[in-house]
Amino acid sequence: MKRIITFTVGLLLIAFAFTWFVLPVTMSQLLISLNNQFSGLSAKTVETKIGPIHYLEGGQGETIVLLHGIFARKEHWVDLARTLTPYYRVIAIDLPGFGDNQKLEPQDYELSAQAENLHIVMKALKIDLAHFAVNSMGAMVVGILAKEQPQLLKSLAFIGSPLGVPTKIDSDMQKAIKVGIIPLLVKSESDFDERNHWLFPEIPVIPAPILQTWKQQELQDTQINEQIWHAANRSTNTPNLIEIAPSLTMKTLILWCNQDRIFHVSGAEVLHEALPNSMTQILNQCGHLPMLDSHIEVSDLYLSFLSSH
């Protein structure tokens, strides 16, 4: 019997190792599914006129909508969502044209178009009031939407720095862009690896099959991603977040990391002064995506904010 058990365990380990190294997409899907389940989330889709939209949902209570930034995806929120699902209904969305969703036309990535598409998704999900927690480009998209549809937002939380906050001090990314380098745009495997150093002071642990799968997806989308970048950044007729801020009267939380290389931390005070009803916390030892590299501290601060508002 012991030999049979040992043999069976050995076969399972071999199969696991084979899948891990030889079939990274399959292993990635398995690991993501297990992590979602562990976090109380289920993967779902909703049909819209802009195509099926993929999202994660779990928990009960008041609704929290989690929205990522450019070239990001709903899975970036899972570690934070795990701490929220015991108390709230949590929905993490792949923004239209990102993540597992089908790509859109380049003009659909202009910020005003993204806000219109997000409104379509909110209607499809029958969300008429929610807490919104947003990051980077997703923050700017929600800002535009909130200006036109303020009744949708019960509260707003910037989890990491948002797009659209002018500062007197250039960030490392802004300095790079001035000399023709776009750190967030991946054109090679080395670009993907290097981007993590732009996003995190210490890169969080993400299983190799998941990283490899996401890397290959981005490399396949190099051409459209460059168009997406320019579309999202040429929205010249769209007001920036500071210009929109006076109309955002809902309770607002600003969490900004002091080691953020994408948008300079001095923007936190600029945004705080522009918003009518905000509180700010500067976080240490994290970068542009604190829901990934500082999710425990973010969770404590966000849950406290929600419970007090």
Image: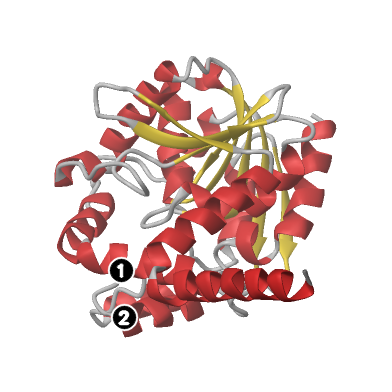
Mark 2 falls on what kind of element?
helix
Q: Does label 2 or label 1 sit earlier along the sequence?
A: 2
Give the Cα distance between marks 2 and 1: 8 Å
The residue at which mark 2 appears reads as 189
Residue in the picture at 50% in, 74% down:
208
Q: Which three-letter amino acid code belongs to the residue tagged 1? A: Gln
Mark 1, other Cα within 10 Å: few <14 / some 14–19 / many ≥20: some
Disc 2 versus disc 1: nearer the observer: 1
Measured as percent of width and height from the top left, residue 22 is found at: 39, 75
Q: Identity of the amino acid at label 2?
A: Glu
Q: State the image quarter where residue 79 is shown.
A: bottom right
Q: Which residue is mark 1?
A: 216
**Is residue 214 placed above or below 156 in the rendered structure?**
below
- Quarter of the picture holding the N terminus: bottom right
Q: Give residue 288's position: percent from left, percent from top.
A: 55, 65
The picture places residue 228, in percent across and down from the top left corner, at 23, 54
Vertical relation: 35 (above or below) 244: below
